[in-house]
Image (cartoon, helix red, strand yellow):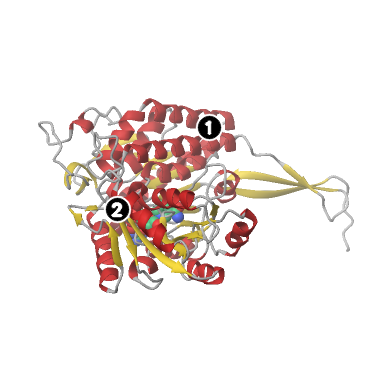
Amino acid sequence: MATEQESGDDGRPAELDSLELAPDEGWNALYVDGDWRPQGDREDLDVVDPTARDAVGTVPAGTEEDVDEAYAVADAAQPEWAEVAPEERAAVVASARELVETYHEDFARLFAVECGGSRLKAEIELDLTKGTMAVAEDLADSFETEEREAIVDGKRNLLFREPTGVIGVISPWNFPLYLSMRAVAPAIALGNSVVLKPSTHTSLVGGLALARLFDEAGLPEGVLNVVTGRGSDIGEAVAGHSTPSVISFTGSTEVGREVGAVAAEQLSLPALELGGNNAHIVTAEADLDRAIDGGVFGSFTHQGQECISINRHIVHESHYDEYVERLAERAESLPVGDPRGDDEVLVGPVQNESQYESIVDLLEQSVEQGARIEAGGDHYDWFVEPTVLSNVDNDMPVAEEEHFGPIAPVIPYEDEQEAIAMANDTEYGLSGSVHCEDVERALDIARRLETGMVHVNDQPLNDDPGVAFGGVGASGIGRYNAEWIMEEFTETRWVSVQDEPREYPY
Ligand code: NAD
């Protein structure tokens, strides 16, 4: 289980000492206008290692003045960057992508230290990060002028795509490098400039690491600026600033609503990727082996801390007892422990204290209301053992709310309508999955789920940088990835040419 890690003279874990990613000044700096701005008289923010529950470093708590300056710098740098040839912009993103490869092991260690992530999680996140960067490189060069027929004789309608300008990016702590990069890479490739505010819980891997990558890749000064700081101090300044044309936010629905409101006040486009309450439906015609394999992966990967993790298993009554028993056996067999050096560990600590307390609270309330613990249930020092709950109904706190933890509540159903109604009985609509050997039937169920994404004979934890990602309802507005992010990060301009003299009515 969680053990104290060996540390150097300065109290930092050995991993951080050897981190080549660290800028010369250490991590304790903001990145504005291509400069590492040392902390100065700004407050400290601890960088916490969740396994040791201890600070391993600090970063500056950026201020509203820092945000103003970052936006001013981004605004000044953007027009020139937009003039750079698309293939040159793509080449900078490609160099940064190659650096992700070069620093693979540093990132894997950093994910373990700052996120409590397993080796498996690091590999998944690094693949997605490189994937989203590669897709962004292709986007840079995909601006094609389109011509549309005109209703006026002798006119040509031309449609140009231009970068939208400055983009504010606010990211969460669960997959921080990837979730920052999926906005930053296409924004930059498409000729925009960026102000990035990472989560307070992952200032390094969600923020300053991206600054280091693009700095080393030769991105011109001011195109990417990173301001670390608390959401409660500077979040509104970032989201409600008058400069950006888009606010790209990934995080909770609660904060997303506030971000959307202050962005809209400035007429900035809010692109919001928010929470989920994803159902894994196992029908009577499911292949139970596949449904359970998917159920384990979708519930327990990275301690269930993904917006697209399984929040509820909705299982046909004919399979219920066997499903619960086998899921519980699998949960008990998962290696839980310190991920900072043991690549076999699959379940590490919860990333932060408030998240840990929230999971434990939802679990305890549900058990009080009659949920039965079939596996796990123990929790200590920010660790929650992989937990399977039976006797759950859809109104219990673990099922009704996004628990965001390594908990698998299993709910029985009798008929298909009931399963669909239960799955849809949530304000969220992000991802989901359906297991049924009759694929046509599975597709029919999938189409009736009110979500942005559904995966047949798989589980909800899927992202593919080439395919539209996003939710409906309280799960957000807009789509990430490929041409869908291009809609948000570029403006379409209509220019018409009247080739023949036009006949006006008077
Ligand atoms: P959070 O909403 O607490 O924080 C997200 C970001 O918002 C952080 O950078 C935070 O500092 C900042 N913030 C906090 N208060 C703010 C304010 N008033 N104004 C502006 N910014 C503010 O979310 P979290 O705890 O970091 O992440 C977990 C949540 O994110 C879960 O609900 C999860 O489902 C969601 N999420 C969604 C997706 C998706 O793609 N849909 C992906 C990952 C996580």
Label 1 neighbour load within 10 Å: few <14, some 14-19, many 20+: many
The image quadrant that residue 73 belongs to is: top left
Residue 423, position in %: x, y? 49, 66
Q: Given the image, on which type of amino acid does mark 2 rest?
A: Pro
Helix, strand or loop status at disc 1? helix
Residue 455, position in %: x, y? 54, 52
Instruction: Return the residue nearer the eye: 73 or 359.
Output: 359
Residue at 46% in and 66% down:
317
Instruction: Return the residue nearer the eye: 209 or 377.
Output: 377
Q: Kindly identify which residue carries mark 2.
A: 386
Q: Which quadrant contains ligand 1?
A: bottom left
Residue at 9% in and 31% down:
9
Work out whether residue 173 can be spotted: no
Report the Cα–Cα distance between label 1 and label 2: 44 Å
Q: Looking at the rendering, in which quadrant would you find the C terminus?
A: bottom right
Residue 10, position in %: x, y? 12, 34
Q: Which mark is residue 22?
A: none
Residue 121, position in %: x, y? 36, 41
Q: Given the image, on which type of amino acid does mark 1 rest?
A: Arg
Q: Kindly identify which residue carries mark 1.
A: 89
- 51 vs 22: above or below: below
